[in-house]
Image: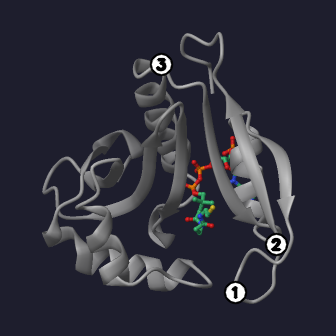
Amino acid sequence: MKPESFSLRPATLEDLDAVVKIENQVHAAPWTEEHFRAELTKPYSQFLVFTDDESDSIIAGYLVFWVMFDECQILNLATSLNYRGLGLAKQMIQKVVSIALKKGIKKVVLDVRKSNSPAIQLYQRVKFSITHIRKGFYSNGEDAYQMTLNLEGEILPDL
Ligand SMILES: CC(C)(COP(=O)(O)OP(=O)(O)OC[C@H]1O[C@@H](n2cnc3c(N)ncnc32)[C@H](O)[C@@H]1OP(=O)(O)O)[C@@H](O)C(=O)NCCC(=O)NCCS
């Protein structure tokens, strides 16, 4: 299936089984179903899934981000193994950026494991920079990079 045959929409409770299945395949310390469920109830949280336009039942990726004050924070973002390398993660970030710009938000931030080079390369590709190192941020003692995309003065950056 082509990447343009997929669209982002808000997640629902019915999506959780499929999301958790992907989450367990792709993350070293996966979120639980309860974790995702909680995000559906937070007024400042947006939980989106990338599904196929034909059946709306294949989940190719998902993201969770918070819109708080003058900042957007990406908490979780993943592409299913079968749909990697098609530009879906890039499109998910573009969605966050377009929502942030509409709300007049000045920056998008996230934390990423120092060892997660595909994700670091993804974020650098869409113009995030490493702004802090958080020593021992993860439960296994691994450091995090805080990465930031500054939107001040941007209309819609060409990511
Ligand atoms: C990181 C991840 C989200 C990328 O998803 P994806 O949909 O395959 O990424 P895209 O196709 O949109 O790639 C966009 C850019 O990211 C970078 N990238 C993606 N995968 C990469 C890899 N395996 N190695 C190096 N760079 C990579 C490239 O710069 C790519 O741009 P290019 O195609 O022009 O070279 C995916 O590998 C994933 O789900 N990983 C596990 C979960 C995770 O680590 N999430 C981030 C936590 S902070």
Looking at the image, is mark 1 or mark 2 nearer the viewer? Answer: 1
Element carrying mark 3:
loop
| SS type, badge 1 | loop
Which of disc 2 and disc 3 is earlier in sequence?
Answer: 3
Vertical comparison of 77 with 105: above or below = below
Q: Residue 1: horizontal and vertical position, in percent?
A: 34, 54
Q: Which residue is mark 2?
A: 115
Q: Amino acid at mark 3?
A: Gly
Provide the residue designation for mark 1. 139
The span from disc 1 to disc 2 (Cα, nearest Å) is 14 Å
Residue 33 vs residue 43, the one in the foreground:
43
Where is residue 99 shown, x and y percent of the image? 41, 29
Can residue 150 be seen at all in this image of the molecule? yes
Which residue sits at x=75%, y=89%? 140
Q: Residue at the spot x=69%, y=86% of the render?
A: 139
Check the image and report above or below for 15 versus 111.
below
Q: Are marks 3 and 2 in contact (CB under 8 Å)?
A: no
Query: Where 47 falls versus 71 (above or below)?
Result: below
Which amino acid does the dot numbered 1 rest on?
Answer: Ser
Q: Amino acid at mark 2?
A: Ser
Where is ligand 1, by quadrant?
bottom right
